[in-house]
Amino acid sequence: MDINLPGDENIYDTECPILYAMRIIGQKWKLPILWYIADTEKKTMRYKELERRVVGITATMLTKCLRELEADGLIHRKQYSTIPPTVEYSLTERGMTLIPALESVYKWAEKQMSAKK
């Protein structure tokens, strides 16, 4: 692994892949949103389903996170012309490439949690 750590530079002023990733997915709600969408059988989830599954998130925060994830190219939003409007979210190809990394972090955390017992 080749990690270039800055000497006297401010780490936030350097190009660091970890910091780049954290800017995109590092907020409290984004990983659970991505995980729930990826974990569904159809790999698609409606807005209201997400609102129910992501316990504790407000509608405002869910909307904000979904917009940011869409802007970053991790999810796709599809709106149907129904009354009331139906909106579905799915992972893009870019978003799907993140899932194996999340699974690895999940397995690592699972081992760490059981080691603490």
Image (spheres, rainbow, N blue to C red):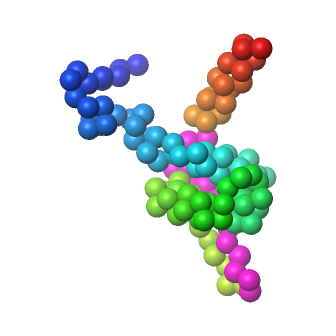
Image quadrant where residue 113 sits: top right
Kindly identify the residue that appears in the image at 67 percent across and 30 percent down: 106
Whether the magenta-drawn stretch holds residue 17 is answered as no
Tell me if I can see residue 114 in this picture: yes
Kindly identify the residue that appears in the image at 71 percent across and 76 percent down: 86
Horizontal side of 101 relative to 7 (left or right) equals: right
Image quadrant where residue 59 sits: bottom right
> Residue 23 or 106: which is nearer the viewer?
23
How far from the left and from the top, in percent, is residue 81?
67, 84
Q: Is residue 10 above or below residue 57?
A: above
Whether the magenta-drawn stretch holds residue 98 is answered as yes
Image quadrant where residue 15 sits: top left
Q: Is residue 117 above or below residue 24?
A: above
The quadrant of the picture occupied by the C terminus is top right
How far from the left and from the top, in percent, is residue 89?
64, 63
Q: Which residues are magenta?
A: 83-99
Labels in figure, total? 0
Tell me if I can see residue 96 in this picture: no
How far from the left and from the top, in percent, is residue 36?
71, 50
The quadrant of the picture occupied by the N terminus is top left
How far from the left and from the top, in percent, is residue 71?
46, 61
Kindly identify the residue that appears in the image at 26 percent across and 24 percent down: 6
Kindly identify the residue that appears in the image at 74 percent across and 83 percent down: 84
Q: Is residue 90 above or below residue 14?
A: below
> Residue 66 or 59: which is nearer the viewer?
59
